[in-house]
Amino acid sequence: MSQRGPRRWVARTVGARSPRRASSRSTAVRGRNRPSVPARDAATDRHQSPNPARSGEAGFAAFGVLAVMLVVVVGAVLALAVVVAIFAPGASQGCDALDGSGEPIGPTVASLGGVAGSGVTRAELETVRSSRLAGPTLTTGAFRSTAYGPPWGGLQGLGVATAGGILIAGGAPKRYIIATDPSVIALGQWVYVWPNPFGWRGPFLAADTGGRIRGRVIDFYDWRGRAYQNRWNQQTKVSDQPLAPDAPLTDDGNPGSGRSASVNAPAAQDVARQVTGQPVGFALVDDTGRVLGSVSPNATNASASITKAMVLIALTQDAQGRALTEAERDLAVAMIRRSDNRAANALFARVGAVSVNAVARRVGMTSFTLVQRKQTADGYVLGYSQVSAVDQARLFARIEELAAARHRVFAMAQLENSEGAGRFGILDSGINAVIRSKGGWRPESEGGWTVNQAAQVTIDGKTYGFAVVLGKQQTFEAGGAAITSVARAAFSDDQAGVGGEGCDDVAPPLSSDTGERIGEIARRYLGKDARRQTFTGFRPPSTSLAWCAWFSTNVWRMAGVPVEVSWFSGYHYTWAKENKTLFKSLGARPRGPTPPLGSALMYGSGPQSTRTSEHLNLVDTVNPDGTFMLTGGNQDSSRVTRQGPCRMTRTDPARLTGSGWDQRPIYAIAAPTPPT
């Protein structure tokens, strides 16, 4: 977090947070501590016109005039130096200049005009600074960033005016402004943010707020539309000083040689070499396809569902001159988001092998072999095609470019929103990046599992292709956990140069045991409140709803359990009943006195509704004496808290024993894997 002193027109408490007010609107009024401009006195002595008869005195007078002029010039230079020193105290530190009214002067590249190149007029600036949400508070360091803007409606708001009073009138005016939590960054503050969606190196004005903008979160106003807004979701750095001031600019206004995302390819290689299985292939490439790190990159493996991304690209290419039909769109959503095999087979039947092989040729794949094998009704016909890690990494490094322009936004939206069991591996790594991915998994007839995943990772403004192909994995969960570990080694929260105080540390590799992984993940979030903080790796990362089930299903999902994210505490019961993992069924006694590690305890009278299913929490530790520890979301003070050691009665309903623990009846217990 920056600890620089004040350098703008208002006294700032840089890095300090104001206490959160009970009201969502700050009542602070911005103070105006503008430095006074020293008077540029250039006093001129008034001399009488010389008497022509007194030639000696005339010569002396001429000399005197010259002397006075010299004094005036020197005085003016000194006065100008004083003015510069007052108005640009940071100039010696390489800071941007200030204009005559004390506002920053933005760069000319990508400037929108107005004050500091932000597009904001002086009248708009004064309106924001007179807002009740204005004030001196400015917190710097790492922030999570999203984007919003037109088309207006729904979560985007009505688009009438910003909270600071800048009129929008339902339109799309160009402005470099952001929405903030006023208790963290008060409205009216100029801040520098990098990376940002525009490649803009000048300042942004804090001029708006949002219902979900709490704490270290900023929302970029992006007038360019939903496609651009949906793309932006990553960690960024906020400063009161220009960021990367020495980075040269390219023609598009983006840094040409700034700091990269510090991708740690050697570390990822080391982790990949420790993964057991046959084969184990890993590749990390840049956006040109250049290999940055690899382990057996050309080793081939059965593709399972990973080739569905190629079918998607083939579909967009085949339909580049027309709109996708409603049926095609529905099939593509099911094929990518839910990895539905029937949908994939239907789309492959439409595009054909020629189109899929054309995608492989455009990427320059050297190891891909398309194999069609007749399957059961629910099987995927291309599941035995042969793929390699380097081919898939290169595909995903360029996947946005490969999709036909007409359907690019639609295709990328599917790859960004995997659901259910498809959210594993790199999607559980917790890295702060925009990730587009497709995974594939299948049990093999000779035993073990095939688990593959490829992804495009955009972090710190740079794009990479990442792929891991694994054969003969003991379980699907084990393969997913291995890919998660490789991804964490390659990328981490603090590698984009935006880490620091207030950022989560990179988590250590998880245990290979599902129950232990659940406990490890649950304990990471102790003390956090999902209404005011983001939970790295969760989908969505925060929520304003009752969130005990949202917490537990996200934890299970991140540990490799193929569950959906749900806000209903009875969801675990339905899932466990279908998958035969109930440790305690409704109306029956528990199978034993100690619930399995990682299991979910459900409180109330049954899973029928939110009135009957009241709460749940997770067993994060089982002690040698049979006692256990529980961690749950939305508990004491609406935070993630822990209780224990606990014991449980073996009755129906079951109950926790001892004072201080939840005394509600436990109607069911769902284990993440079949209990022994």
Image (cartoon, helix red, strand yellow):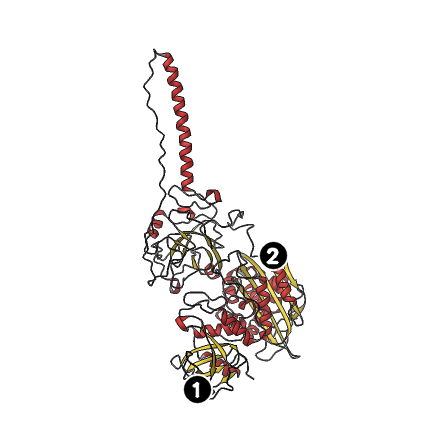
In the rendered structure, the answer to whether residue 50 lies left or right of residue 547 reads left
Residue 457 in picture, x, y percent from top left: 55, 61
Graded by Cα atoms within 10 Å as few (under 14), some (14 to 19) or many (20 or more), the crowding at tag 1 reads many
On the image, the x and y values in percent for residue 503 come to 49, 61
The answer to whether residue 382 of the structure is visible from this angle is no
Q: Amino acid at mark 2?
A: Thr
In depth, the one of 352 and 539 nearer the eye is: 539
Toward the top, the furthest residue is: 53
Q: Vertical placement of 627 versus 158: above or below?
A: below
Q: Amino acid at mark 1?
A: Pro
Relative to 197, residue 659 above or below? below
Mark 2 closeness class: few <14, some 14–19, many ≥20 residues within 10 Å: few
Find numbered disc 2 in the image and state the secondary structure of the residue it sits on. Answer: loop
Image marks 1 and 2: residues in contact by CB distance under 8 Å: no
The residue lying at 57 percent from left, 80 percent from top is 377
Q: Residue 134 vs residue 631: left or right?
A: left
Whichever of callouts 1 and 2 sits on the residue coming sooner in the sequence is 2
Q: 284 or 161, which lies in front?
A: 284
The front one of 317 and 431 is: 431
Q: How far, Cα to Cα, is label 1 from label 2?
A: 60 Å
- Given residues 659 and 417, the one toward you in this image is 659
Specify the label residue 653 is tagged with: 1
Residue 228 rendering spot, x and y as whole percentages = 47, 59
Residue tagged by mark 2?
288
Residue 238, percent across and down? 46, 54
